[in-house]
Image: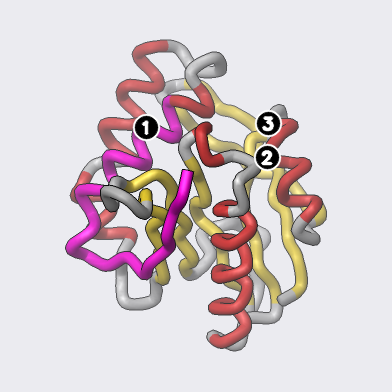
Amino acid sequence: MNWTIRRAGLDDAEALALLGAATFLTAFADVHTSAEIVEHCRDAHSVAAYHRLLAPSTDAWLVETASTGAPVGYAVLTEPGLELAGPGDLELRRIYLLPGLHGGGAGAALMQLVIERARERGARRLLLGVYSLNGRALAYYRKHGFEQIGEHDFLVGETVYVDFVMARPV
């Protein structure tokens, strides 16, 4: 599939919300209960949630199909919300692609844009949180220079999941 990447803004909140819920559901349908995942997607991936996330200090990108412009992936770089963050850190809050794009270069291109933008913003380190049992994501992040520096809890519904906090120098 041919794709393009462009900067995303507040006008893209609806597309990001749809894509956020779809990719979260695709990635974690076998981990969370139906009630948990529906509640999480409804709350964390609402249009209002993306309006809040797309603050002036946030950079976001959309991956779209080249032929139709349909959203198929995205990344969000923002001020860190992780407990292990320090001065000069930024957080890769989200980076997801629909499964049909895995391995096609869009993920690497998104990651490169995120790292370049973090460097432009003067960050010393890039942080992220990733589900500790998500082997595919862990391998992807390690391939891009991230190392585990700790753990934090991630709540979905009433269930607490362990996420690894990973970092890489910028």
Q: Are marks 3 and 1 in contact (CB under 8 Å)?
A: no
Could you tell me if the residues under marks 3 and 2 are in contact, i.e. CB atoms within 8 Å?
Answer: yes
Element type where label 2 sits in the image: helix
Which element is circle 1 on? helix
Earlier in the chain: of badge 2 and badge 1, it is 1
Q: Nearer the viewer, residue 110 or 44?
A: 110
Please identify the quarter of the rendering in which residue 18 is found. Answer: top left
Label at residue 76: none
**Real-space Cα separation, disc 2 to disc 1, in angstroms:** 17 Å
Q: Residue at x 44, y 33 (%)?
A: 24
Q: Residue 89: within the magenta? A: no
- Res. 137 mark: 2
Give the SS element for disc 3.
loop
Taking the spot 56% from the left edge, 87% from the top edge, the residue there is: 120
Looking at the picture, which amino acid does disc 3 mark? Answer: Asn
Instruction: Report crowding for label 3: few under 14, some 14 to 19, many 20 or more residues within 10 A (C-alpha).
Output: some
Instruction: Identify the amino acid type marked 1.
Output: Ala
Q: Which residue is mark 1?
A: 22
Disc 2 residue type (three-letter) = Ala
What stretch of residues is rendered in magenta?
1-25
Q: Earlier in the sequence, mark 3 or mark 1?
A: 1
Residue visible at 35% across and 34% down?
21
Asked if the stretch drawn in magenta spans residue 18, the answer is yes
Question: Around disc 1, counting alpha carbons within 10 Å, would you say few (fewer than 14), some (14 to 19), or many (20 or more)?
Answer: some
Q: Quadrant of the C terminus?
A: bottom right
Query: Could you give the CA–CA distance between mark 3 and mark 2, rounded to whole angstroms?
Result: 6 Å
Residue 134 - label: 3
Q: Is residue 111 found left or right of 39 in the rendered image?
A: right
**Residue found 54% across the figure and 37% down from its top:** 154
